Image: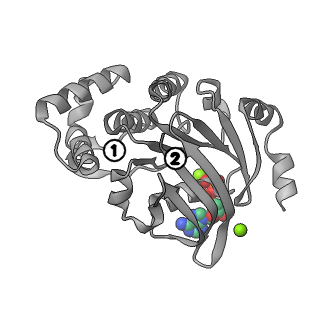
Amino acid sequence: VSTLEIHDLHVSVGDKEILKGVDLVVSSGETHAIMGPNGSGKSTLAYAIAGHPKYTITSGRVLLDGEDLLDMTVDERARAGLFLAMQYPVEVPGVSVSNFLRSAVTAVRGEAPKLREFAKDLKKGMDALAIDGSFATRNTNEGFSGGEKKRHEILQLELLKPKIAVLDETDSGLDVDALRVVSEGINRFRESGDTGVLLITHYTRILRYVTPDFVHVFAAGRIVEEGGPELAEKLEDEGYEAYTKAAL
Ligand code: ADP
Ligand code: MG
Ligand code: MG
């Protein structure tokens, strides 16, 4: 079992404190949803875990299997088994999807996968996500639709097999078909039991397809309520207003 532990995390951007003491434990095989209104700090949590230089950790600890994640470089975090899919993936001009993914696998494993084995895994992953073969030769993220970006993220998951995956706003901009394919990808992952998923979302929509084991409600930089899947249903009916008011 792998575990991501977040202890009393405080994060600032500039001199503004955004996360005000977040505690969260995610183990492999578990799916946790973080839900909350816009501006509550959900993406800040993802960026802070990713090691984005704009986000300053002012106190608290983040451990992956007992190792201090905040001490690691971004590459070391990936090698330790952390995967972060960001809300706005960067374009990598002149690098094909296939080469991008092979580099990512190489970085995580510390050695390049054999070409034939990689090609087989890539084809299998693309087939599972209903991705056309020509996708592999396109420039990474260049002109990708919302659905293509998300499929690309899940394809990375399939190939990298991380211990803990942090997926931010995975359902934004997805039509129903794409949402279903992406959700099925996440569910395949859950069934393997090897990966812990932290699914960060504003909308309850994706949670109709991916049932979380735990739901955490974020408001004003803190977790203000926790529960099981029934909490997602309550949020779908009632929205975030009660939490937003209480947090002020
Ligand atoms: P969420 O993902 O829940 O919508 P964010 O983490 O994106 O929330 O933002 C939380 C708060 O932090 C917002 O008030 C936002 O304006 C601020 N913030 C986040 N990132 C930055 C940044 N890079 N520069 C300035 N302010 C930021
Ligand atoms: Mg505190
Ligand atoms: Mg966000």
Ligand 2 falls in quadrant: bottom right
The residue located at (63%, 27%) in the rendering is 211
Tell me: 16 left or right of 128: right
* Category of crowding for the residue at label 2, using alpha-carbon neighbours closer than 10 angstroms: few (below 14), some (14–19), many (at least 20): some
Tell me: 228 left or right of 15: right
Earlier residue among tags 1 and 2: 2
The residue located at (44%, 36%) in the rendering is 150
**How many dots with numbers?**
2
The residue located at (38%, 24%) in the rendering is 129
Q: Secondary structure at mark 2?
A: strand
**Which residue is tagged 2?**
3
Q: Quadrant of residue 159?
A: top left
Mark whose residue sits in front, 1 or 2: 2
- Residue furthest to the left: 115
Tell me: 99 left or right of 59: left
- Ligand 2 near label 2 (Cβ, under 8 Å)? no
Q: Secondary structure at mark 1?
A: loop
The figure's colour scheme reads: one colour
Q: Quick one: quadrant of the C terminus?
A: bottom right
* Category of crowding for the residue at label 1, using alpha-carbon neighbours closer than 10 angstroms: few (below 14), some (14–19), many (at least 20): many
Q: Nearer the viewer, residue 212 or 145?
A: 212
**Which residue is tagged 1?**
141
Q: Quadrant of residue 30?
A: top right
